């Protein structure tokens, strides 16, 4: 067991002992987004690898998962997020025993976690999962954009300055962070997102079949998984899909997810409504039922860090169709696993037609996609994190001793 000390006392962890790891996040189930899924997988794998990992979050409901500590918070407008000024007593008791504080958001819970880590003299890691600069451009009006940009950049910079190690899931996100705080670049590194690849090894018996949606065996199915939100750039793909169908593409588009832009998307896709299937939100645990149905995974977003939806689709041997953006560079040999078009409906429509006309090429790309997915196994990603946690705790102990 760990030898744990209270505030202001030295905090040592032997090499053969468990680490007590705290993952602090604003995004965790029942919230459905990329960060919540990434952290659910990481938390479960850290426990599976023998670590004493705990999640801390704000919410309106308790969690049934082990070692998840929920403090009831105030809802933030119409969003699924909550805020609170401090952790509740049960969460605080556990947090005081942590070896390392790993903070995954620059807002809300970050301030609470930082204050506690400073008081307890515990090391802090900060991981930024989001290209906030792009989100602000997409979601905020031109009037409010400068103020939102200043606020987010200030929060990001404060978090990075307070952290011994700073990570991002992609090099493009890391470059943006380095621009915000170039003097801290030596503390920054990339640690990719991971998923349990074995979930997608075989389609489940209850996998969705195309005849259930009235799709013919010869049609090419394009699929999307994610929020229907402005920053996902789905309007461009919807317009491209209608164009491609009008040009003779025997294609269907399945959209898994929901959001404020759904009505807009439905209106744009009305010209091919009988070929567009909105299936609504699906829990991540159920995705293995749906992904095998796709022929091509389509994601026109330009604002991602390292989306797990792409990795999940690759694990199912699905080629991708996307829009040229920096974040695709995270996938080795990605050019062989799909096609990237200009952020233009005409160019995307041409790519949709190409996929419909080249089934053999699709299958070859799918095989390459499968090989790429092997780089993102949650077992190896969690092992990287354990090494980072151990490194930081050892360095912190030496610093405290000196």
Image (cartoon, rainbow, N blue to C red):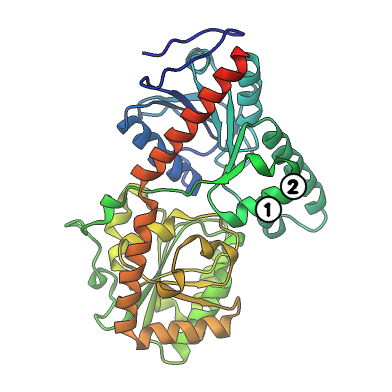
Q: Is any atom of residue 86 visible in this view?
A: no
Which residue carries the number 1 mark?
Answer: 176
Instruction: Say which of 44 and 260 sits in front.
Output: 44
The residue that appears at 43% across and 40% down in the rendered structure is: 384
Q: Residue at x 68, y 60 (%)?
A: 138
- State the SS at label 2: helix
Near mark 1 (Cα within 10 A), the count class, few <14, some 14-19 or many ≥20, is some
- At x 38% / y 21%, what residue is drawn? 18
From the image, tell me which residue sits under label 2.
Answer: 180
- Determine whether, in the image, residue 293 is placed left or right of residue 223: left
Circle 1: element type: helix
Q: Quadrant of residue 30?
A: top left
Q: Is residue 1 visible?
A: yes
Against 37, residue 267 (above or below) is below
Do the numbered discs 2 and 1 sit on residues whose CB atoms are within 8 Å?
A: yes
Position above or below: 312 against 109: below
């Amino acid at each position: 067991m760990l030898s744990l000390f209270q505030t202001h006392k030295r905090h040592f962890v032997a090499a053969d002992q468990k680490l007590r790891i705290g993952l602090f996040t604003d995004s965790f189930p029942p919230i459905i987004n990329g960060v919540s899924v990434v952290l659910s997988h990481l938390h479960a794998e850290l426990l599976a690898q023998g670590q004493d990992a705990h999640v801390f979050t704000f919410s309106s409901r308790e969690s049934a998962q082990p070692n998840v500590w929920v403090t009831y918070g105030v809802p933030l407008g119409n969003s699924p997020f909550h805020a609170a000024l401090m952790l509740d007593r049960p969460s605080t008791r556990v947090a005081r025993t942590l070896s390392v504080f790993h903070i995954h958001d620059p807002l809300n819970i970050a301030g609470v976690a930082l204050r506690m880590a400073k008081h307890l003299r515990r090391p802090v890691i900060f991981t930024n999962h989001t290209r906030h600069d792009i989100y602000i451009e997409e979601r905020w009006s031109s009037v409010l954009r400068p103020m939102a940009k200043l606020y987010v950049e200030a929060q990001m910079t404060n978090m990075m300055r307070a952290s011994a190690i700073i990570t991002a899931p992609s090099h493009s996100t890391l470059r943006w962070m380095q621009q915000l705080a170039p003097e801290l670049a030596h503390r920054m590194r990339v640690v990719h997102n991971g998923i349990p690849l074995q979930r997608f090894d075989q389609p489940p018996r209850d996998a969705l079949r195309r005849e259930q949606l009235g799709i013919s065996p010869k049609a090419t199915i394009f699929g999307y998984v994610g929020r229907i939100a402005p920053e996902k750039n789905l309007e461009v793909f919807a317009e491209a899909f209608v164009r491609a169908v009008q040009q003779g593409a025997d294609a269907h588009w399945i959209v898994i997810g929901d959001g404020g832009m759904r009505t807009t998307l439905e209106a744009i896709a009305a010209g091919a409504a009988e070929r567009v299937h909105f299936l609504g939100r699906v829990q991540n645990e159920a995705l293995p039922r749906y992904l095998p149905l796709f022929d091509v995974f389509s994601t026109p977003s330009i604002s991602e860090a390292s989306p797990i939806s792409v990795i999940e689709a690759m694990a199912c041997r699905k080629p991708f169709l996307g829009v040229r953006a920096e974040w695709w560079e995270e996938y080795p040999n990605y050019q062989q696993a799909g096609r990237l078009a200009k952020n233009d409906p005409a160019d995307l429509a041409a790519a949709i037609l190409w996929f419909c006309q080249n089934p053999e090429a699709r299958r070859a790309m799918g095989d390459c996609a499968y090989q790429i997915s092997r780089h993102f196994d949650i077992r190896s990603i969690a092992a990287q994190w354990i090494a980072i946690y151990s490194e930081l705790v050892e360095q912190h102990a030496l610093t405290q001793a000196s």
